[in-house]
Every structure is written in structure tokens, then in C-alpha cells.
Amino acid sequence: MSLASNASAGSILEILNTTAPATLELPIGDWPRQDLLDALAATTDLASASAESIARILMTTSLRRQENTRVQSLETLVRSRLPQAMLDQLDFTIATHLVNHDEYLRWVIQMVGGWLNVGDGNSQCFNHAIRHMPDGGAVIEIGSFLGVSVSVLSYYLTRLGRTNRLYNADPWHFEGTEKPVGGFFDGSRPVYRQYCVETYKKNVSLFCEQNMPISIEAFSDDFFKMWDDQATVSDVFGNKVKLGGPISFAYIDGAHTYEAAKMDFENVAKHLLPGGFVLFDDSNPQLNFGCVKSAAEAAQTLGFSRVFGHVNGLNVFLNKKS
């Protein structure tokens, strides 16, 4: 079957949707077909199609991009013809599909515990950043608690075949424990801190065994000072490691004050590679943390742009322009 070059975006996408594999788990064989790619490339009315329709195309083509230069050209062409609002929705749709159809992701989040939820958007940001971040830089998490987020980051690095080294830092001193939680539990006691550190180590040893993070017990300011100095230190597992170098993706989830989150961003930004990503946890404008303001200011920093910026209700997720 061949398609006329003036076919509408809707008709081409309808054919693509019915011929493309239904899930990412199936082998894709000879798809995408050359005649459909040619017809899609000739279409100038892509903006009239839905993000969900184009997402299915690009989710499938992304599986072939490394081996098929024709597919790479198609993805570039499709993206060049779409308005930014639709690109945001498109990328978020792709990431959401990948998150929602990942059985292990949901399971490990439930098993480890903590504050990460599949539906809060952070998992989509993790997935997008690790799929698109540059090679050669570190992945850094500030704030680890019991290890759920770093377990997800480790999983994505392994699952997506990325070789970027994974680091994280946490002093295991907790905000909100100045008085008993709910008037009942004293979270400032050393025994609680010891419980959290030991639980973290057990979780990470089990769920990150294929890609262990370098976990440093330190406040983020001290961690970045060691990073700047390229210091050799011991992590919580007793491994001697040398810190420092470029960063490809940073997840900022430390102290939620304005000053702390602002400093964390500044410390990351000076090492962040072009094309790298930064995600601020709990920076949704609807929340009442100081980091909401520092994240909003970071989004205005020259050389940075919002990822998924037209999708409502998400935390601030930034990309450093190439």
C-alpha cells in the first residue's frame, strides 16, 4: 500500500496506529514500513493530530533509532513540525506509557516505601531524563531517605543500558522532626536515624545490586564541596571512591527550604553537561515549600528550559540547552 504525499495527518496516523505494535514488549519486526514513513514525512499538518497518536509512533520508532538512521530522521522531522506545547504533552505521554506499563517499577516502589508515588510525575521525569541525558556525566540524587528513588534510578540505568555512574548524598537528619510527629513519635532520636540508615543500606543492597550507587553520608553542601575538590572518600558501604566530574542528571530532593534548594541547584548547574537535566522534588506551585520558589527561579536561569512545561501539576523539571 502506498500513500499520497498530501494525505492528512489524521489518515496517516490512523494507519500508523493500526499497524504499529500495540505494546513495547512485542517484537517490532519490519515496522516502521517505508511507505508510511515517507507519507508521514510528507505531511505538514501534524499539529492537528493528538499527542497520544504521535506518541505511539515515536515510542515505537525510538526502539529503532540506534540502528535505523531513517527513523532518527523521521523523529527529528516530526518534532520540528510540532508546537512546544504539543511536544511537552507528547514526551510526557510517552514517559507515562512507559511508567504505567512497568510492573517492576510499581512493585519496587511499594516494597521499598518512602515518598515516591507512580502517579506524581517524578517517575516519568526519571525515565525521560535517563533516556535522553548525555553520556559521560554522573547521575546524582540529593536526599535518599530509605532508598526508593535511587532504586528506581538504578533500575532505569540498568534497564535502559546507560553507563552513567550513580551517586547520592544524605546526612539522614530529617526536616519536620523538631517536635514529635503527630504529638506521638519522636523522630529526632538517634535510634530512628540509625533505623533509616540501616534500612536504606538493606534496600539498596537488594534492589540496586546490578547498579550500586555511591552513597555518601553528608549534607549536600559538604557533598558538593568534596565534588568540587575531587576528593577521595568512603561511602556508607565502606568503598573508597573519588568524587567529581561532569553531571548528566540531578534529582534535588534534600532540604526543602528556599536557601538549600537554591544552593543545590547552583552546585549542580556548574557541573551540568549541555543536554543534562535537573528535577526538583516537591516544587509543584500548589505546594508550600521554600523549594517551590527556588525551583521557579531556576527555571528562569539563562540556558535552561522547562521539560513537560505545558503539563499541569508537575514538579519543576529542567533541561540545559545543548
Image: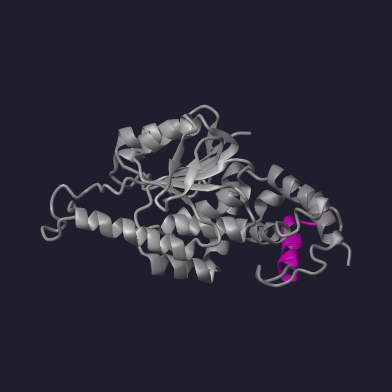
Q: Quadrant of the N terminus?
A: bottom right
Q: Quadrant of residue 260?
A: top left
Furthest residue toward right: 2
Q: Is residue 125 left or right of residue 187?
A: right
Furthest residue toward left: 183
Question: Which is the main secondary structure of the residues drawn in magenta?
Answer: helix
Query: Residue 43: percent from the left, percent from the top?
Result: 78, 51
| Colour scheme | one colour
At x 60%, y 53%, the residue is 90
Instruction: Note whether 125 is above or below 231 in the view shown.
Output: below
At x 39%, y 65%, the residue is 112
The magenta region covers 6-19
Q: Quadrant of the C terminus?
A: top right
At x 49%, y 59%, the residue is 152
Q: Is residue 292 magenta?
A: no
Q: Is residue 298 visible?
A: no
